[in-house]
Amino acid sequence: MYFYPCLLYVAGLLVAFAYDDISYKRVASQSHTIIGLGNEASNAVDRKTSTCMRTLPIGRNNPQKTVWWKVDLGGVYNIQSINMLFKNYDGYEDRQRGRFAGFSLYVSNTGVIQGSRLCYKNGPHDHLPPLNFTAICPESGRYVIFYNERYAGVTYPTGFELENVFTELCEVIVKGCRNTGYYGRNCDSPCPTNCKDSTCHIQSGACFMCKPGWTDIHCNKKCGDGWYGLNCSQQCKGHCRDGATCNHVTGQCDKGC
Ligand SMILES: *[C@@H]1O[C@H](CO)[C@@H](O)[C@H](O)[C@H]1NC(C)=O
Ligand SMILES: *[C@@H]1O[C@H](CO)[C@@H](O)[C@H](O)[C@H]1NC(C)=O
């Protein structure tokens, strides 16, 4: 009776710590860097909480209105979570949270926000983000991008800092599987064979997309008769010999016309 909750607790710890840190010392870059030593983008992936990246301030009356920071993981990986540590100054925690507020997190294969997947956006109805913030983000991708903005003429929620909004990320820890194409608590289960790009949901193993010719959550079903290709969205042309259906991958008549 009494050790059951205890087992659950231990299991929870295992889940929390099983994934790999896949952003450590990867190549990081940012939209603009404030002049001065020790403000580089790479400070957010050095695993020293005392060094932070720092950009030019954004704000209604600042020349800069938008800011981004990104890390190139070096390959396409299955991701579980993104933890960010925003700089704190004793006595200024609310101001720092107001600077952090409103940010977005994207996962991307190309490194540009257009066409990438939004994994989290702060506000307008959330509380101001805690300075140690974790987003659960079961996606696959090569880049993780942090983005924030402050435009003139936009009404922002209470608590948002609007002027001289410095972005100072001390650490960005992306947890996922360092083994490309693997998922599961120990990153030791291969993604289903027919997942596109060998990427899948890090907990369930479901494919994000299938290779051409395949369908269903684990992409282990052929396209229905008469259909082929990516998403099974192409219709066979017909006229195959003996009334056969076309090849589910290529759309060709395997045994001739
Ligand atoms: C941030 O919070 C997580 C738990 O939510 C904790 O494990 C981690 O140590 C915290 N990081 C810092 C630098 O305090
Ligand atoms: C397949 O489906 C995905 C997601 O629904 C979509 O983004 C993509 O454009 C589709 N591709 C084709 C060829 O239909």
Image (cartoon, grey):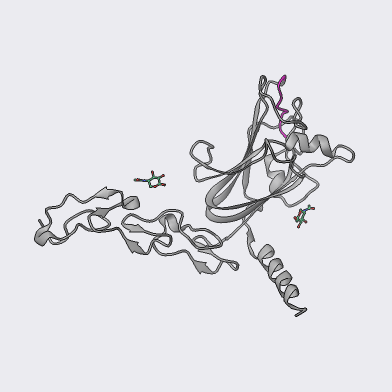
Q: Position of residue 149 (x, y in %)?
A: 65, 30
Where is the N terminus found, in terms of image quarters? bottom right
Secondary structure that dominates the magenta span = loop
Q: With respect to residue 217, does 237 lie above or below?
A: above
Where is the C terminus found, in terms of image quarters? bottom left
Magenta stretch: includes residue 29: no
From the viewer's perspective, tell me whether residue 255 is left or right of residue 219. Answer: left
| Residue stretch rendered in magenta on the structure | 54-61
Instruction: Give the residue displayed 73% in from the left and 37% down from the top.
Output: 100
From the viewer's perspective, tell me whether residue 72 is left or right of residue 173. Answer: left
Q: Position of residue 24 (x, y in %)?
A: 66, 53
Q: Position of residue 48 (x, y in %)?
A: 77, 50
Residue 154, quarter of the rendered image: top right
**Looking at the image, which is closer to me, 27 or 7?**
7
Q: With respect to residue 219, does 163 lie above or below?
A: above
Residue 160, quarter of the rendered image: top right
Extreme-bottom residue of the structure: 1
